[in-house]
Amino acid sequence: MDQFKKDIHILVVDDDPGIRETMCEYIQNAGYISHYAASAEEAIELINDNTFQIVITDILLPGMGGLELTDKIKRHKDADVIVMTGYSGDYSYEEAINIGASDFVIKPVRLEELLLRVKRVLKERQLTRERIRMMERLQELAITDGLTKLYNSRSFYSQLELEVDRFNRYRHPLSLLLLDIDHFKDYNDTYGHLEGDKTLVRFSQIIKSCLRANDSAYRYGGEEFTVILPETGGEEARTVAQRIRASLEAEKFKPAPGKEVTITISIGVTQYHPQEELSTFIQRADKAMYLSKENGRNRVSILYVDPPLEAQVQP
């Protein structure tokens, strides 16, 4: 907790030098780092140049008032605000909270009570951040494969729909790769699933290293992967596929002491055809991948939809 306190900066804004200095001293003695400002304008300058977790401000200030200061802080900064007032009849708790304040205290403020409110606001702040981190983590888990950290098949279908919509608007080419590791079941049976998982992780890294920023890779299932290539025609997609295939073939795996193994992959390539169904697009990539399997594996095959239907297989 002591280290936590050392990272907390609290700004007191009050035009009464006695009040702000007394508060700052009390906050400092409690283990936090305290600062003060005599006006909202001075506070804004400090806030723009520094990071504060909490701002404690009087409502009545010379120039800009405390509620306007609170509004500006909540709109532009990541800080909680505790509002003070000695005029409880003129300003309500609801008014301060509605404008974004985290708490509201009446002057004269008991310093012990103020410290308790600071601690409560800090605790709520911490809990909020933990909830945000948890939600971000849950969202990440929902769209990514836990082992390879690539996007999962659910994300694949969603993204492919978006890319097809983009194709229909702008008519930029769109290509798809379907990849399947050759003889992966035999590898798992021989060396165990742990070594197989290591291979999947490494292959996922190889795929990502071969892609551009706007390309995306997915674990489709088991040892199958897909890659969406926006603004990419079939021939350019085939070049990307060959780069992935060659990179994996060049990698040496060591699943057992003194054992060095080369792993290969079969890849199907196709380009989207206007107005076709997503399922047809994916099935054509799948057929191209099986052509690679049937022709000896460790190769890239491309299927075109434009008549006449053409298949090209490259080792």
Image (spheres, helix red, strand yellow):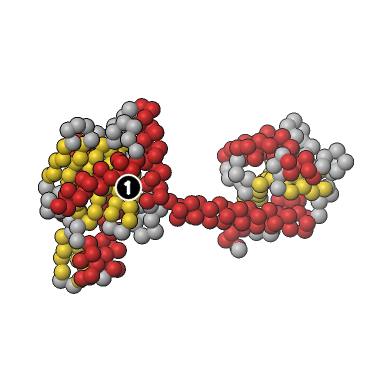
Rendering coords of residue 219 (x, y %): 33, 53
In this view of the protein, can residue 156 be seen by the observer? yes
Residue situated in front as seen by the camera: 295 or 212: 295
Rendering coords of residue 169 (x, y %): 38, 27
Residue situated in front as seen by the camera: 237 or 66: 237
Using the rendered view, name the quadrant where residue 250 is placed.
Answer: bottom left
Give the residue displayed 20% in from the left and 40% down from the top: 303
Give the residue displayed 76% in from the left and 42% down from the top: 96
Residue farthest toward the bottom in the current orientation of the protein: 257
In this view of the protein, can residue 21 be seen by the observer? no
Residue farthest toward the right in the current orientation of the protein: 89
Task: Determine whether, in the image, residue 116 is placed left or right of residue 240.
Answer: right
Q: Residues within 10 Å of mark 1 (few under 14, many from 20)?
A: many
Give the residue displayed 40% in from the left and 37% down from the top: 162
Describe the element under mark 1 as helix, strand or loop: strand
Residue situated in front as seen by the camera: 103 or 10: 103
- The residue labelled by disc 1 is 217
Using the rendered view, name the quadrant where residue 88 is placed.
Answer: top right
Task: Determine whether, in the image, residue 251 is placed left or right of residue 123.
Answer: left
Give the residue displayed 39% in from the left and 42% down from the top: 159
Rendering coords of residue 84 (x, y %): 78, 45
| Quadrant occupied by the N terminus | bottom right
Q: Amino acid at mark 1?
A: Ala
Task: Determine whether, in the image, residue 275 is placed left or right of residue 140.
Answer: left
